[in-house]
Amino acid sequence: MPVRITLNDLIVARGIKARDLAAEVGLSETQLSLFRSGKVRGIRFSSLNRLCAVLGCKPGDLLDYDFDPADLIGETQELD
């Protein structure tokens, strides 16, 4: 998967515990864990807003992209 979640890097850089972040953001530890591992299909903007506010970052700091030529080929899908 070319889009990677980089939340772990921010958690380590900020020296906070994931459970404390989850509580401050208002997510369950399970929800945060699923996002951190990239096992979710999406995230609500309200959750993304809270993560950025608490971590003092921008959405682009939570995600990274590794180019894959296959992303340019195939069926197009509408955004959800």
Image (tube, rainbow, N blue to C red):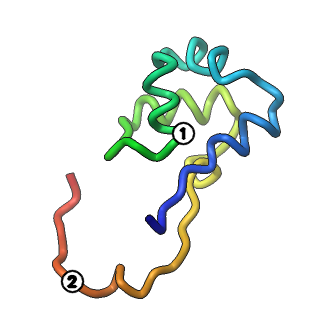
User: Which residue is found at the position 56% from the left and 48% from the top?
Assistant: 59
Q: Is residue 30 above or below residue 11?
A: above
Earlier sequence position, callout 1 versus callout 2: 1
From the image, tell me which residue sits under label 1: 36
Q: Image quarter for residue 53?
A: top right
| Numbered circle sitting on residue 74 | 2
Residue 34 image position (x, y, % from top left): 45, 34
Q: CA distance from mark 1 to mark 2?
A: 28 Å
Residue 10, image x and y in percent?
Answer: 72, 41
Circle 1: residue type: Arg
Residue at x 65%, y 24% (from the top left corner): 18
Is 74 left, or right, of 69 in this rendering?
A: left
Left or right, residue 30 beside residue 62: left
Residue 13 location, x and y as percent?
A: 82, 39
What secondary structure is found at the residue carrying circle 1? helix
Q: Is residue 12 left or right of residue 62?
A: right
> What residue appears at the point 59 percent right and 48 percent down from the top-left corner?
62
Q: Which residue is located at x 60 percent, y 14 percent?
A: 24
